[in-house]
């Protein structure tokens, strides 16, 4: 099986830049995607294909990868960005999907 | 706009079968481009992929749940279904249905809380 590891919590000052990371062997072979989840709501796709943004997602959200680590960067964090962020990728079998444990982002 | 909506009982007794329906609008589950997927989130935890149904009823399951899970579809109703047998309190979760394309999930249902309790 595959695992993706995320830091449980990260904080950022309003207007500053924050990077949320996701580590796992499957990321060497498969693209990461990222989801924002506010309390009581369904996840929303913010990054797919490692560094692409769906329409409607602000350009302050960006994605990247280096080796087995994918990153979600928020440049100029806003209060409304406070949420849980989940990464995912195809698992090593190439069939299933694996998620990270999620990172709770606090905007100070 | 694609919309997905979960429905089903909010409470299931231990050892019984959890059954949920996902109704899709704005797209056809028989189109052949997407994996129609179930994902769950236990209280205070991360997301867990359960499995999918694809064109012609092909399925794929999380190995950790495979012995208890069945995902099926009814293209005439544009619905797909989740059955999870022999549930325990560890299966208490919010269950989401979602559309997967190219390894990512672009549309999600709002989620359905299912509590396993006697």
Image: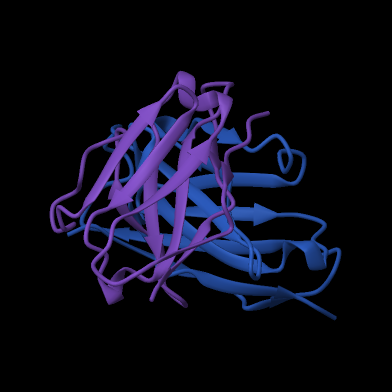
Q: Quadrant of the N terminus of chain B?
A: bottom left
Residue A25 horizontal side relative to residue B115, left or right? left
Residue B25 horizontal side relative to residue B83, left or right? left
In the image shown, does A52 or A74 lie closer to the viewer?
A: A74
Residue A65 visible somewhere in the drawing: yes
Residue A22 horizontal side relative to residue A37, left or right? right
**Relative image position of residue B37 (x, y in whole percent):** 47, 46
Q: Residue at x 39, y 40 (%)?
A: A71
Q: Residue at x 73, y 62 (%)?
A: B91
**Relative image position of residue A41 (x, y in whole percent):** 42, 73
Question: Against A37, is B27 above or below?
Answer: above
Q: Residue at x 55, y 29 (%)?
A: A91
Q: Which chain is purple?
A: A
Q: Residue at x 31, y 68 (%)?
A: A81
**Relative image position of residue B2 (x, y in whole percent):** 23, 57
Question: Against A95, is B116 above or below?
Answer: below
Residue B55 horizontal side relative to residue B46, left or right? left
Q: Which chain is blue?
A: B
In the image shown, does A18 or B47 lie closer to the viewer?
A: A18
**Relative image position of residue A64 (x, y in whole percent):** 32, 34
Q: How are the colours assigned in the image?
A: by chain
């Amino acid at each position: 099986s595959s695992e993706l590891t995320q830091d449980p919590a990260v904080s950022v000052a309003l207007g500053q830049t924050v990077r949320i990371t996701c580590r796992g062997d499957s990321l060497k072979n498969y693209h990461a995607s990222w989801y924002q989840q506010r309390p009581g709501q369904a996840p929303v796709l913010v990054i797919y294909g490692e560094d692409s943004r769906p329409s409607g997602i602000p350009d302050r959200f960006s994605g990247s990868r280096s080796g087995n680590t994918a990153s979600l960067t928020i440049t100029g964090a806003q209060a409304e960005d406070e949420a849980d962020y989940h990464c995912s990728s195809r698992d090593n079998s190439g069939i299933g999907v694996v998620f990270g444990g999620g990172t709770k982002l606090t905007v100070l | 706009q694609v919309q997905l909506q979960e429905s089903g009982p909010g409470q299931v007794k231990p050892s019984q079968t959890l059954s949920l329906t996902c109704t899709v609008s704005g797209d056809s589950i028989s189109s052949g481009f997407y994996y129609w997927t179930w994902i769950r989130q236990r209280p205070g935890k991360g997301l867990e992929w359960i499995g999918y149904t694809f064109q012609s009823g092909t399925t794929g399951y999380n190995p950790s749940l495979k012995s208890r899970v069945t995902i099926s579809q009814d293209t005439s109703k544009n619905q797909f279904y989740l059955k999870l047998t022999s549930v325990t309190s560890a299966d208490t979760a919010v269950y989401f249905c979602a559309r997967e394309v190219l390894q990512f999930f672009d549309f999600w249902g709002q989620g359905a809380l299912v509590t396993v309790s006697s």
